[in-house]
Image (cartoon, grey):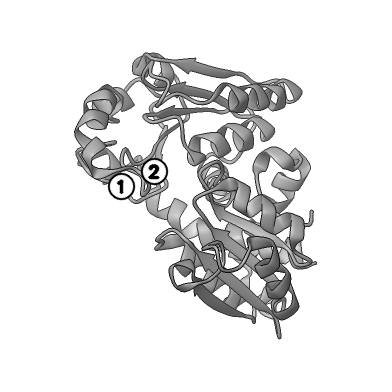
Amino acid sequence: MKNLISLKDISADQINGMLVLAEQVKKHPWNYTHIMRGKTLLMIFEKPSLRTRLSFETGAYQLGGHAIYYDMSTSPMGAGKESISDSIKVISRFNDIVMARLFKHEHVLEMAANASIPVINALTDYSHPCQILADLLTIKEHKGQLAGLKLAYLGDANNNVTHSLLFGCAACGLNVSVGCPDNPELMTEASVLDDARRIAGEHDVEIEMTADPQAAVADADVVYTDSWMSYHIAKEKQEERVAALKPYQVDSKLMSNAKPDAIFMNCLPAMRGYEQTAEVIDGPQSVVFDEAENRLHAQKAVMIKLLA
């Protein structure tokens, strides 16, 4: 595995291998403090971040390396002054590994095509593989397994988190039920569903799309939601989106349709009273802060694998 761009592009064995390594890194962090000694991670940010920057920068340090924060708002890269392909070729001469949090997926693909060092997709409009590796690690910790479980996703299903959940869960043997409005702007794209169902077929699991939130959550082991107002969505769309997505809000009544021991997940940031109620996210079934912490351990595993 040279890069981590999308979970669609890597095998189930590679995903599970990273999860096993992440478990070991979390249990025995001192065994890995030498891995990045003398090495530098360049962190390219076009979109704002809390968890991504802190987890990658901390992870590089804990592996013995150094991280550089690079803000694209003050950069000639991609701004008509220097091409992404030229920029990444220069970066490859200075650094050992690069992660990029970008708006457009095609830009991280261009980086990967022109880099001579590993490239990690830390989020694009299409894919968020690092988040879903942390999610899978969290589910495995709380449930003891992945294969055979059911994950229900509620809300806006036309985003990078839903895409990567579909790819990652299908590869790891989880059934996925997506509950979202019957609205093209909020539904998963057909091409993504086709790819996810192909992966699901290889692992004997099912992917379901429904406009009925109760049906989506029925007998789920994991209930997952995401922000209704992602960074790229204009503020003037908030009222319209809230009206469309309100039936998919995860409250205690909706959670009661899941299994009694179901866990609740949100990749954060979260707004109480929007995609979920406070009683759910702050309640005993919520594992959102375990999920956030696991970004660190999963991403350390990714860097170790790519630098091996």
Residue 12, quarter of the rendered image: top right
Residue position marked by numbered label 2 in the rendering = 266
Please tell me whether mark 2 sits on a helix, a strand or a loop. strand
- Mark 1 crowdedness (10 Å alpha carbons): few <14, some 14-19, many ≥20: some
Q: Is residue 74 above or below residue 123?
A: below
Residue 95, quarter of the rendered image: bottom right
Residue position marked by numbered label 1 in the rendering = 270
- Residue 100 image position (x, y, % from top left): 57, 61
Left or right of 194? Residue 153 is: left
Which of these two is toward me, 197 or 114? Answer: 114
Q: Are marks 2 and 1 in contact (CB under 8 Å)?
A: yes
Q: Residue 112: in sight, yes or no?
A: yes
Residue at x-position 43% and y-position 61%: 51
Which of these two is toward me, 149 or 248? Answer: 248
Separation of marks 2 and 1 at Cα, in angstroms: 7 Å
Residue at x-position 22% and y-position 39%: 236
Locate the C terminus and report the quarter of the image it occupies: bottom right
Please tell me whether mark 1 sits on a helix, a strand or a loop. loop
Residue type at numbered disc 2: Asn
- Residue 257 image position (x, y, % from top left): 35, 20
- Residue 2 image position (x, y, % from top left): 78, 57
Residue type at numbered disc 1: Ala
Residue at x-position 64% and y-position 30%: 170
Residue at x-position 64% and y-position 27%: 196
